[in-house]
Amino acid sequence: MRHGKWPLIVTFLVPPVLLYVFFVVSPYLQAFQISTTDWLGYSADANPVGLANFKALWRDDYVWNALKNNGILLALVPVLTIVLGLFFATMLAMGGRKGRAGVTGVRGGALYRTVYFFPQVLSVVIIALLWKEVYHPNKGLLTSALHGLGLPSPTWLGDPATAFWCVLAVMVWSNVGFYVVLFGAAMSAVPKEIYEAVLLDGASRFTTLRRVTLPLLWDTVQVAWVYLAIFALDGFILVQLMTNGGPNFSTDVIGVRMYDTAFGSETKFGYASAIGVVMFFLTLSVAVLSLRIGRRERIEYS
Amino acid sequence: MNRRDILRRSAAAGLLATPAAGLLTGCATGGGDKGDAETYKGTKSAENPLGVKEDAPLEVVIFGGGFGEEYAKAHEAMYTGKYPKAKIKHSATQEISKTLQPRFVDGTPPDVVNNSGAGQIDFNGLVSQNALADLGELLDAPSLDVPGKTVRETLLPGAVEIGSYDGRFLVMNYTYTAYGIWYSNKLLTDRGWAYAKTWDDHIALCKQIKAAGIAPWTYAGLHPRYMSWPLISTAIKLGGPSVATAIDNLEPNAWKSDSMRTAADAWHQIVKDKYILDGSSGLDHKQSQTAWCQGKAAFISCGSWLESEQKDVTPAGFNMTIAPTPSLGSGDKLPFEAIRGTAGEPFMVPAKARNLAGGLEYFRTMLSKKGAQDFTKKVASLTVVAGASEGVDLPYGLNTVVRALDASGANGFNWVYNNYYRKLERNLVDAACGEFFSGRIGPAEFLDQCQKGADSIAQDSSIKKYKRAA
């Protein structure tokens, strides 16, 4: 075994590591270096300016506004998505109560599972354009439905009071399907006897979810939490395509700010890199924090 | 070896690899200057005033937007007609900045770039980094097919000024665009309405239109800067071109001048009286223009590209017509006919283009009467070449643009702050317009917000500032 180990490592591990270093690690390091310059992106000249970009960031109201929006997304998107995902997955796995002693899903579970997964199959761009039409203030699905009921409707993406929540709803909508499947798979690994025992003890569905399912699924939920937190700190594609941060910066997120600073209304690549560096550390800390806070004893079925 | 060990060891491997990656840093900003190695130069002669090397390849990148790319292929064919040995590399993209940014840094940019569209590269950034070639030589070269005239002498007034930064002509804006208020001539004639020449009459007309069950106005709520154009035009017609110069030069309180105040107060009327189509604030430019084409609204603010942009959805006999903004009163410094006309659709030759002379010669081909006429025929847009639309059969809307520009004549006006400081119009004034035209803020707050945006640009030492004379 000894003599066979190194060729294996060299063949299978070194090429991916090199690719990773070249395409992922090195751009990160470059971003750190660029963030300390005043590079404007269209010449090779860049003067080192130390931490001036970060000082400017600290006083940039637009960046703070974008960070605030990311903060709200971070607080709401993971919670809403996970709660909805758990609810749907539970209903699909054990929502039915027809046969008293058996644990079954609601009728038509297979169909629901497919339908929930639809958004995951669509590309984010399609989702954004689809919802832009749903939110069309004159002939969109939502507006027409409200008008059909004789209710007034807001202008959705055109009003700073509603635009942000419209985008947030799309974020949750587009993610829930995946987590229904993820939680569903995790639930199917839980031995049925546990549920049967709980049922015999007369626990309600909600108690079952809270006291039995959730603790058993904790690892999966935690992974979901980290993914969704990272997603909430990004949100770039959806926002850029649906509102581009408007109206009046009400849906701005940090990713859009970075893109706009480099490729949009300005060419400040140094400053944009500084925003990127801040984003990097924020995402890293959020991921580490949510792993630390959520740490619990692992449960092994035996 | 369990899973944890593998993870630990690969992490160590990653750390070892880091110094190697460190060597790579600086690539993005450290490369470049390959373009200096050799540039193609030919010998200058009367036939070849720009010194084109006849077999040098030429690379042209076109913005694949509303005008398409066929017109450019025709220009390229004209170029190779004169230089049959030259190979032309043609490409079209909608993402100019993302596609070309690495090549500018690398020092190997294309020879001709049509820097336009939403992915346009901010000109302030390009100019302040000396990334653009001086096109002055082109202006003094003889025109290709107008005998006895230099290229400069064949251009419409204002075409050179708009592309000049600190007196150097760096950007060749090819089309000639008028900005005004558009209506369907059919709608107005059918109903017996006439376009109002004064603001009070305009408001009275709006009242009539609304009573007839049509919304007087709509606008691109997701790009509300479109509405800043008629508002600023109204102010310039009231106070004269100095209103625009002050804004362009970022003078203190330029946005809060008396003329701007009066104009903002006037335009607030259409918001207060609810003369704007419900839901407009949630529409993008295509959606609002389509609602207008469907007759749901009577007026919309746009530039003269509107007709070709709406070609697919405009009903037959719609007869779209451009008109200047109404006058505020007899005190206006400019007559009603004065309209904003300016050169648009920017083309540039990068300073590090290998075939710089070829790029200039390509522009000379575009600016020849033949090249300009072909463009107008193909894409139904005017060019900066004087008289090039003569004898070309123009569509209805473009004909009204020609007439409006003729009537405006020497009273025509323009502003350029959007070229100097892209962010100011695209982000800051845009956001203020959104708040103002949806009725969330009043005229005073609107001008305050615009002024705050202009001040933030003025105070930002990392942005190069430009001044223009009155």
Image: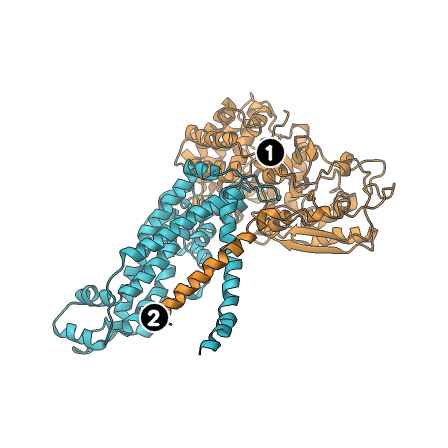
Quadrant containing the C terminus of chain A is bottom left
**Same chain check for tags 1 and 2:** no
Residue at 33%, 61% (x, y): give it.
Answer: A224
Label 1 amino acid?
Val
In terms of secondary structure, where does tag 2 sit?
helix
Name the disc covering residue B5, or none. none
Q: Residues within 10 Å of mark 2 (few under 14, many from 20)?
A: some
Q: Residue at the far left: name it.
A: A201
Q: Which residue is mark 2?
A: A113
Q: Name the residue that disc number 1 marks.
A: B416
Tag 1–tag 2 contact (CB < 8 Å): no
A30 left or right, relative to A99: right
- Side of B323 relative to A222 (left or right): right
Per the rendering, the colour in which chain A appears is: cyan
- Does residue B282 appear in the picture of this structure? yes
**Secondary structure of the residue carrying numbered label 1:** loop
Residue A148, given in percent of the width and then of the height, sits at 34, 55
The N terminus of chain A sits in image quarter: bottom left
Q: Which chain is orange?
A: B
Whole-Å distance between the Cαs marked 1 and 2?
56 Å
When asked about the image quadrant of residue B195, the answer is top right
Residue B167 screen position, x and y as percent: 68, 30
Res. B296 visible in picture: no
Q: Amino acid at mark 2?
A: Arg
